[in-house]
Amino acid sequence: MQADQGENGATAETIIQTEQRNNDHQKHSGERIIEPENALTETTIEALPERSRAACARAGWTKLLPVQARAIPYLLAKRNIMVQSQTGSGKTGAFLLPILERIDMAKRACQALILVPTRELALQVSREAELLGGDFGIQTAVVYGGVKYGPQLDAFRAGAQLIVGTPGRILDHLLKETLSLESLQILVFDEADRMLSMGFYPDMKRIQQFLPSRPISGYMFSATFPGYVLRLAGDFLRHPEFLSLSRDHVHVIGTDHIYYLVPGMQRERSLIRIIEMENPVAAIIFCNTKSTVHFVTVVLKRFGYDADELSSDLAQVARERVMGRVRKGALRFLVATDVAARGIDIPDLSHVIQYEPPEDLELYIHRAGRTGRVGASGVAISIVAGMEQYKLREISRSFNIALQQRTLPTDEDVAAIVSQRVIALLEAELRSRGSLELERMQRFIPLGRSLTESEEDSPLIAMLLDNYYQRTLQAPPQPPPADAPVEKEAFEKETFKDKKKPRPRRPKDRPRQRGFKTG
């Protein structure tokens, strides 16, 4: 169960109504900001408590960034809130400063837990926490998979008050009872959309049963809030309020428009890299011709992805088979021409990918409009090469769309994110094994050690890991389950309504708890 947020609580209806209320303000000010009904005045460094002012001085901050100025008052007031803010906008400071204010220095136990999707982000957040914490003596622990447990256990024994970590390794410690959350006061989900794309939802749900039964503060930060992220908020936060800063083309009920400039002869390889990084729950990939649709579908299938094609050349029986999978929500990637995709609606469509810009400017709007529907947000990605970027800029000017250019991921970027995803999946699978399976696998531990020590045998390990990862590509990362189709009325009524959820199974020998409350 989750605690009531009281008069300050906001639902999906409030988010939608608040956006409408802010439209007039946006027209006059040029800013696109969505605030809670009972909005708080933004703060400044001079208005912060003494400890926070000292932390800002230590970090060399002369003024707060917009997300910090807007969000900090809500966190200090202990109002549960979802904050939409792009990576790199300063959101880490927005939740760290209030955490530093609220930690009881005399208590050597975990009082704040920050869940993040990757080890890099965990290290970044912990370094900033140590910089801001400075001489206050706050003990910080950083926890993620793929490394030894020893230093993490030492940090817990030393009385870490702030823990930053990935859900999988945090869950490992909770199951082994090497970490307790009994003193927890604050829970932060940082980059919640990326945590779901990494496949952490099952781990997050299992962590929920270890949280205190008393009210704690819950906060969620995310660059986008598609339907499945909003449902995650519904799982963990009771009537969360909503804050979005759109000065840098951040918006809530709509779509983020992104493009990648790629080498003309490597468009299909660039598509794979982008998909690997984004890891969409479901996507339509638009192509201009039937032959390109077939080519892209073959590439995706050969790489291991669950993909199917739709074009006017497709036989009726084959079309019905594809459409049947679409209607069931059982197809992850649909590759289609504009004509073939007319009238198709895919639930929880997180991404639209334009493999090449449309020949008709109007088609961009029709394509991008497939995502970011009914109170959720989505991502429209365009892949452009050479002179095509000028056509995209013309579309941007014609329809007043703020396009964000992103750097094409390198092979090293993809390898890093895939490695972390594999570690998370393997650790989750290990946790699910029974005692007989654990006993059986012991015979391979000496072999595993010898293979890792031999340079000549490393391709064997790479082959096994690749085979394992290819099997995972057929299924999308597990999002929070949808109780109803994501249509406007259903979304508003079902996603945030007060309903009883099935009680999660608790570990053996642990006292029964009433679940996570935020108050």
Image (cartoon, grey):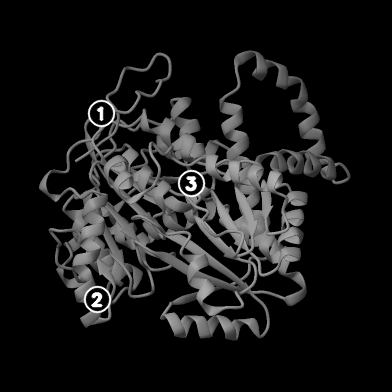
Left or right, 6 with reference to 433? left
Residue 460 picture location, percent across and down: 84, 40
Q: CA distance from mark 1 to mark 2?
A: 41 Å
Q: Earlier in the sequence, mark 3 or mark 1?
A: 3
Query: Residue tagged by mark 2?
Result: 26
Q: Could you say whether the residue bearing mark 2 is in a helix, strand or loop?
A: helix
Q: Earlier in the sequence, mark 3 or mark 2?
A: 2
Q: Classify mark 3: residues with Cα within 10 Å, few (<14), some (14-19) or many (20+).
A: many
Q: Quadrant of the C terminus?
A: top left
Q: Are marks 3 and 1 in contact (CB under 8 Å)?
A: no
**Circle 1 — which element?**
loop
Percent position of residue 389, x then y: 60, 82
User: What is the quadrant of the N terminus in the image?
Assistant: top left
* Circle 1 residue: 213
Is residue 461 visible in the rendered image? The answer is yes
Between 230 and 494, the one nearer to me in the picture:
494
Residue type pointed to by label 2: Gln
What crowding class fits label 2: few (fewer than 14 Cα within 10 Å), some (14-19), or many (20 or more)? some
Instruction: Report the side of 264 relative to 144 (left or right).
Output: right
Q: Give the residue type at disc 1.
A: Ser
State the residue at coordinates (17%, 43%).
Answer: 5
Q: Which mark is residue 362?
A: none
Give residue 251's quadrant in the image. bottom left
Mark 1 vs mark 2: in front: 2
Q: Which residue is mark 3?
A: 196
- x, y percentage for residue 191? 43, 54
Q: Closer to the observer: label 3 or label 1? A: 3
Left or right: 255, with 433 as reference point: left
Q: Amino acid at mark 3?
A: Leu
- 485 or 136: nearer the viewer: 485
**Element at badge 3?**
helix
